[in-house]
Image: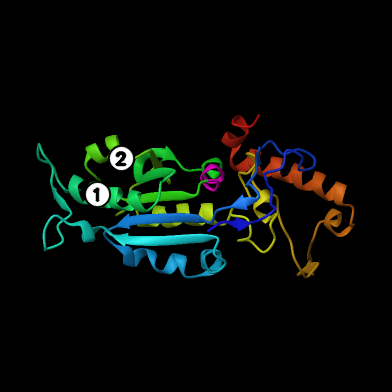
Amino acid sequence: MLMKMSYCWFLFQCRPPVLRGFLFIRSNYLCPMHIDILTVLPELLESPFQHSMMKRAQEKGLLTIQVHQLRKWAVNEYGMVDDYQFGGGAGMLMMCEPLAKAIEELSVQRKFDEIIFLTPDGELFNQKAANSLSLKENLLLICGHYKGIDERIREHFVTKEISIGDYVLSGGELPAAILVDAIGRLLPGVLNNETSALFDSFQDNLLAPPVYTRPEDFRGWKVPDVLMGGNHKLIEEWRHEQSLIRTKERRPDLLNGAD
């Protein structure tokens, strides 16, 4: 279903005083995003999508998440989806046949913009990747388990491989939840304040500046005067300066990637 929306999703070129970024535009006719997830442990994905922003996104009809039990496409009545590796080695491997059948059946229902395998040796996921994926309409996520999936599935079906960091987890379910959350919160209409995501850390290769709320004075620890003065130009300049300082101190590598 198409939802007519007059909406421009800006990652400002003009965030004062500077934002090095790019412009994302969703057209006036906006299709809600649909994400399918293949897993042998769908229970691990129940809670992350039933609360907070992801619950709101689904209730508003902006995001549909369907989690599929891979054993539905098992090779036998016992639900077999994994087997031993050729050549020997510890650990089981997810088989070609269940994954191929699942991908092909789901692909009949909708055309996927990306078929993504969550794997430690994939491309490192970051905010830029989340921004890009948030513009897609249909995604299929494959959660690996055991020692991963047969290489032939990666060669012939998978279009993108993503890692959430240089460490190994028990499976791809938690990375899939992270991916969906990072993407889903960027969809227009999900956040109460539509500009909130524009000022997140990493959107312009800078960490977010310090933030404060009431009371103005807590145990003698006071909010910086500039934030109380009402001069928005000075406030934005201060925030940008603080972002630079924080990034230099904590993540100088991000500055190397800035324009």
Label ID, residue 46: none
Q: Secondary structure at mark 2?
A: loop
Q: Can the viewer see residue 95?
A: no
For the stretch drawn in magenta, what is the main secondary structure? helix
Report the side of 159 relative to 29 (left or right): left
User: Do labels 1 and 2 touch, CB within 8 Å?
Assistant: yes
132 inside magenta stretch: yes
| Residue bearing mark 2 | 157
- Quarter of image, res 191: bottom right
Of labels 1 and 2, earlier in sequence is 1
Label ID, residue 99: 1
Report the side of 251 relative to 175 (left or right): right
At a point 70% along the width and 44% down the height, the residue shown is 243
At a point 58% along the width and 40% down the height, the residue shown is 251
In the rendered image, the quadrant that contains the C terminus is top right
Amino acid on which disc 2 is placed:
Phe
Q: Where is residue 37 drawn, in percent x and y?
A: 36, 56
Q: Secondary structure at mark 1?
A: helix
| Vertical relation: 9 (above or below) 216 | above
Q: Which residues are magenta?
A: 130-135
Amino acid on which disc 1 is placed:
Leu
Q: Where is residue 21 drawn, in percent x and y?
A: 66, 37
